[in-house]
């Protein structure tokens, strides 16, 4: 599995995006802040965008999906635990 960052575009019709993320990814998502999530999924950034309804017609809102290649920083330890548990090859959930 890969990790993707989902970033809702502020000021657009993205009110359905939070429930779309929760419905599509269940325990394989981690909310970072309002309008930003990490998700663990197989496939490409386009596959994740399509699964969320961001593309092709923005039925659940607009946003950016970025595949994470590496990570570093300072954050809540729960975020690092989630990333470690859901990184490439780790079981989801």
Image: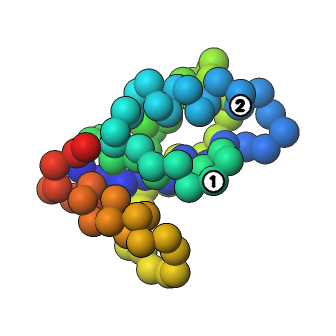
Q: Residues within 10 Å of mark 1 (few under 14, many from 20)?
A: few
Task: Name above or below for residue 32 compared with residue 8.
Answer: below
Q: Residues within 10 Å of mark 2 (few under 14, many from 20)?
A: some
Q: Residue at x 59, y 33 (%)?
A: 18
Relative image position of residue 65 (x, y in whole percent):
53, 47
Residue at the limit of the structure toward the right, as seen here:
11
Q: Residue at x 52, y 49 (%)?
A: 31
Foreground pick, 70 / 37: 37
The answer to whether the residue labelled 1 contacts the one labelled 2, judged by CB atoms less than 8 Å apart, is: no
Q: Is residue 29 visible?
A: yes
Give the mark nearest the N terminus, 1 or 2: 2
Q: Residue at x 16, y 49 (%)?
A: 91
Task: Name above or below for residue 83 compared with residue 14.
Answer: below
Task: Name above or below for residue 83 compared with residue 70.
Answer: above
Left or right: where 17 falls relative to 82 = right
Image quadrant in which you'd find residue 77: bottom left
Relative image position of residue 1 (x, y in whole percent):
24, 50
For the C terminus, the quadrant is top left
Q: Is residue 58 visible?
A: no
Q: Dot 1 lies on which element?
A: strand
Foreground pick, 47 / 79: 79
Left or right: where 44 falls relative to 89 = right
Q: Residue at x 63, y 18 (%)?
A: 59
Left or right: where 60 falls relative to 20 = right
Image quadrant in which you'd find residue 82: bottom left
Relative image position of residue 13 (x, y in whole percent):
77, 27
The residue that label 1 is drawn on is 33
Q: Dot 2 lies on which element?
A: loop
Distance in Å between CA atoms under marks 1 and 2? 14 Å
On residue 14, which mark appears? Answer: 2
């Amino acid at each position: 599995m890969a990790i993707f960052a989902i970033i809702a575009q502020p000021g657009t019709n993205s009110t359905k995006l939070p429930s779309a993320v929760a419905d599509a990814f269940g325990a394989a998502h981690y909310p970072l802040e309002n309008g930003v999530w990490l998700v663990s999924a197989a496939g490409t950034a386009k596959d994740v965008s399509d699964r969320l309804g961001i593309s092709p017609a923005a039925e659940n809102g607009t946003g950016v999906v970025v595949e994470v290649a590496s990570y570093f920083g300072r954050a809540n330890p729960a975020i690092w635990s989630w990333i470690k548990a859901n990184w490439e090859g780790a079981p989801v959930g």
